Amino acid sequence: MPRYRSRMPRIVVGVMGPGETATAAECESAERLGELIARRGWVVLTGGRSAGVMDAALAGAKRAGGLTIGILPHETDASASTFADIRIVTGMGEARDVVNILSSHIVVVCGMSPGTAAEIALAIKKGRHIILLDPPRATADFWTGLGGPLVHAAATLEDAVDLAARLLEPPG
C-alpha cells in the first residue's frame, strides 16, 4: 500500500463573476486571472459552467497547468466547463453559492451580475476576504460599506493576485 505524505492543504481561490452576461473584457480578464492564480500554485474554483467568467478563469488556469474545480448547480455535469478538472455536481441551483464561498480561502470578483452580488454578500457574511477587480467607485463604496475590512479593490490583475497573497499569509 502506498504511503502518502501529509502536506499543507492547497489554497483555493474562488473566481466569481457573470456567466452568460459577461462581457468580452470580463472574460479576457478572468482568463488571465485564472492563469496568474495557477502560476502561484493555487487552485481555481468557479461556478463550473461553460459560460462567461467561470469558463474563462478555468481556461486560464488550465493553460498555466493549474488544478481547477467547478461547483455545478445541476444534477449532472452536462453544463460543465471542459476546463474543470474536478466537477462537483450539487443539484442545488443557485444555493451552490454557499459551496463556492465556503470552499474558497479568498474570493476575487471579475465583473458584476445579480448572482455575483449574491456571492459577494455571502462571502461577507461568512467572513471571507473579497477582492473586487477594478470596480467602479460606487460599487467599491457599496461593498466596503457592507463588508468593511473584508472588501478590497485592485486596479490590475497582478495587484489582485499580490493582494490575495498578502491576505492569505498567516498572521504573525
Image (cartoon, rainbow, N blue to C red):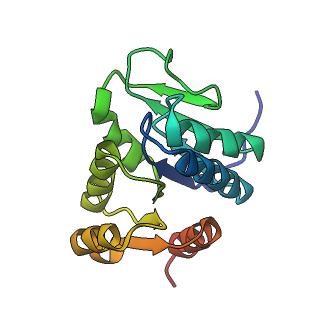
In-image side of 146 versus 16 (left or right): left
Q: Compared with residue 44, is residue 124 higher up or lower down, i.e. above or below?
A: below
Which residue sits at x=61%, y=65%? 157
Q: Position of residue 144 (x, y in %)?
A: 29, 73
Which residue sits at x=34%, y=71%? 140
Q: Compared with residue 133, is residue 16 higher up or lower down, i.e. above or below?
A: above
The foreground one among 69 and 119 is 119
The foreground one among 156 and 86 is 156
Residue 159 shows in this picture: yes
Q: Compared with residue 16, is residue 20 higher up or lower down, i.e. above or below?
A: above
Which residue sits at x=44%, y=33%? 20
The count of marks equals 0
Q: Position of residue 61 (x, y in %)?
A: 68, 45
In-image side of 52 versus 150 (left or right): right
Q: Compared with residue 91, is residue 137 higher up or lower down, i.e. above or below?
A: below
Q: Position of residue 139 (x, y in %)?
A: 32, 66
Residue 7 shows in this picture: no
Question: Which corner quadrant holds the N terminus?
Answer: top right
In-image side of 149 versus 161 (left or right): left
Q: Position of residue 100 (x, y in %)?
A: 41, 43
